[in-house]
Structure formats: C-alpha cells, structure tokens
Amino acid sequence: MRKGWFRPTIGVAIISLGLLAAADLFAEGRKYDPGASDTEIRIGQTMPYSGPVSAFSVIGKVQAAYFRMINERGGINGRRINLISYDDAATPAKTVEQVRKLVESDEVLFMFQSVGNAPNIAIQKYLNDRHVPQLFAGGRSMRFEDPVNFPWTMGFAPNLQTEIRVYARFILDNYPNARIGLLYQNDESGKEYLAGLKDALGARAPAMLASEAPYDMTDPTINSQVVRLKAADVDVLIDMAAPKFAAQAIRKTAELGWKPLHLLGVGSSSIDAALAPAGIEHARGLISASSFKEASDPTWADDAGMKRWSAFMASYYPEGDRNSLFTTYGYSAAELLVRVLHQCGDDLSRDNIMRQAASLKDVRLDLLLPGLAINTSRADYRVVKEFRMMRFTGERWQPFGPVVAD
C-alpha cells in the first residue's frame, strides 16, 4: 500500500457522507402528499365542456392557458403545474364519477375551480372525508364558506345570497315601491337566491315580491316563465338564470315589448355568452354587478394589471373573448392559486395548502377592482366579498356607484 493513500480516501468518504447528510436534511424540508413531487403539482378539475352551461367552460380553458404560462416561466418553485380537467357537463352524477377518477386514479393533490353549485355540493362530502382540498370552488353556495363543517372546501366568488342582497338593497334604495319578479333555476342555487332575496327585503317581501318563476335546466326554453312574470305586472326583473336561459329571457322580454328594470346575475353577464346571443340591442340598460375590472372599459386602458392580462391573452389565449367576464374570472382564480402555491414553499401537503389558502392577507389581484383586497382566515373562508354595480351601455359594462358588500 502506498504511503498517503489511505488518508485522502477517508477524506473523500467523509465528504461524500457529508453531502449525503446535507441532501437528507434538504429532503427533510420537503413535504409531499399524493400529486406533488420535486417536479410536479398535479391538480384536478371538472368543467362543463359540453351541455347547456358549456359557456362556463371558458373558465377552464383560460386557466389551462395561465398555468402553461407559469410553467414556461419556471413553474412553482421549480415544479410544473399539471392541470387535469375533465368534462362533467355540469351533471352532479358525472362530476362524482370524474372526481373519484381524479382522486383515486390520477392521484391529484387537490381539486381546483370545478364549476357549478350542484356539482360542487355533490363532491363536497367525499373530498372533505378524504381531506382533499376543494380549493376556490367554482360555485357560490354558502356551503363553500363554512370552515366549521367543511374545512377542506373554500369558494372564490361572493356567495349567491350576498349577490342578491346587494341587488335587493339597490332596489330598496332606488325603487322602494317595485313589484319584483325573480327568475331562477329550480335547484339548490335557486333556493339560495330566493331565500336571500326574501331575507333582504324583510317585512316588505310579501308586498314587493310579486312573482317567482323557477325553471329546470332541462327545459327547452323559459318563454312561459317570462310571460308569467309580465302577467304579474312585474316592473323589476331579477334574472338569476344561467347564460343560455338569461339570453332567452332578454330576447323574450324584447319580443313582448316588456321593459322592466332588468337586473342580471353576475354569472350571466358575459357579453359573449349571454348578451350577444340575446341580441346586443336588447341588452342595453341591463344592470348587474362585478368584483372585477371590465376589459372593455377604457377606464383601465393604462392599468398595470389590465396590461398584464392583455399580454397574457395575446400570448397564451389569443382565441379568447376579450369581452367575456369568464376570461377575467378564470384568470383571477388561477392567479390567486399560484399565489397560494408559492406560499406553500416546499411543504406541498394538503394540510399546508389549506393553511396557506386560509391565511391570505391584503392580496391584490391584477383584475380585482381598486379598493378590493382578499383576506382570509381559519374562521373566514370568504375570498372575494365585495361588488360594484354596473350598467350595460350597448357596447360595454360601465361601473357606477361605490363598492358594496353584504
């Protein structure tokens, strides 16, 4: 044995052991649940790419484009976002089937932004029982803002009752003697709208609520409901129908020569999905509400957040409708999710994902209206909580009045 050979070998071994120990310590700083790794964050989603509310599928398309942008920029702390988005046609039974596949076969880390109240309600217990986050659910039931009973579910947009109470307050302030008609879908969402309206009107509800007109999603048209509302001498129509049926209601009121004050739910205020199919000329004067900047409003032409959105649309979703509220909504939810994932660092456990989502402080998104910010806590799962009223000019939605909240 040559002299001096043994000592350097021991040194190399010690260095190697040291490197291995450092690697182990580094690895110990990471925490992964199924769907996460050093290279990937696997996310599940269902969208109505087919069926009567397929207009909402734009949300999933714009989010896929947003995550593609993030991946091209290096991902989240070096990890690529893999969004697996399946069609459920907004049918709860199909949603359950697809979500089981996503959780049990695809092994996603969490569910993100599945669309619709009924579909999200159908999977809520399943996901909560398995401690799988149902993050920024694309439904607006108060069930999605209930951390006591559903700690693994968090919504995104203001809940249905908050929205309709804002409309009720607008009516009470400006049309105190109105005869109100409510058009709504005959499901859990519609019942929340009805309950919220009656609650907001209080003792005046029996006198002001002149007619209720529910419809089923399988109905071919809602013409008969519109005729019934007109016959009840309604002069303020609160239209909480899905985009396809909202378009029918706008068109039918025009055909009847009926001109009530027409308040349109924010979920159906998309120019592309509801107003254009109804006939833009029939939509002039409609009133709705939003929490986000309107892309078609020249007020935001030089706004930094709007410029970032415009650049994204041009590069990653050029086929998208710039006037659609669904594109701005989908972009904003994806932007917030990326913020949460960055906050998670190397702890991509499901526990930590919910912990970070429930500890957002003064978050300003690119397209959130000035003055609005996102603050959450373990006791407050409400994400976007405020609105601003807006009126359709025939070309764009024009905001008016102050920011309002329930």
Image (spheres, rainbow, N blue to C red):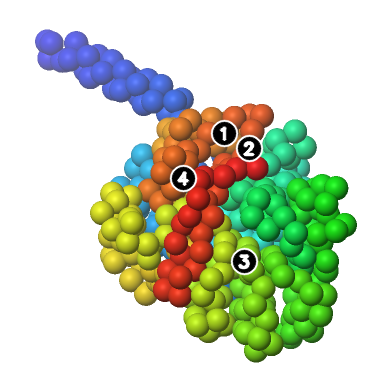
Q: Residue at x 65, y 77 (%)?
A: 259
Mark 4 or mark 3, which is nearer the start of the sequence? 3
Mark 3, secondary structure of its residue: strand
Pointer 4 and pointer 1: residues touching (CB < 8 Å)? no
Q: Which residue is mark 1?
A: 376
Q: Earlier in the sequence, mark 1 or mark 3?
A: 3
Residue 381, labelled with which disc? 2
Q: Amino acid at mark 4?
A: Leu
Q: CA distance from mark 2 to mark 3?
A: 26 Å
On the image, numbered disc 4 is attached to which residue? Answer: 336
Relative to 159, 64 lies left or right: left
Few, some or many C-alpha atoms within 10 Å of disc 2 (few <14, some 14-19, many ≥20)?
many
- In the picture, the quarter occupied by the N terminus is top left
Q: Give the residue type that dot 2 points to.
A: Tyr
Disc 4 to disc 2, C-alpha distance: 14 Å
Q: Is residue 166 visible?
A: yes
| Within-10-Å neighbours for mark 3: few <14, some 14–19, many 20+ | many
Q: Which mark is residue 264?
A: 3
Tag 3: amino acid: Leu
Determine whether 255 is above or below 98 in the image.
below
Q: Is residue 401 left or right of residue 5?
A: right
Quarter where residue 72 is shown = bottom left
Q: CA distance from mark 4 to mark 1?
A: 12 Å
Nearest the camera: 340 or 9? Answer: 340
The percent coordinates of residue 304 (x first, y second) are 28, 49
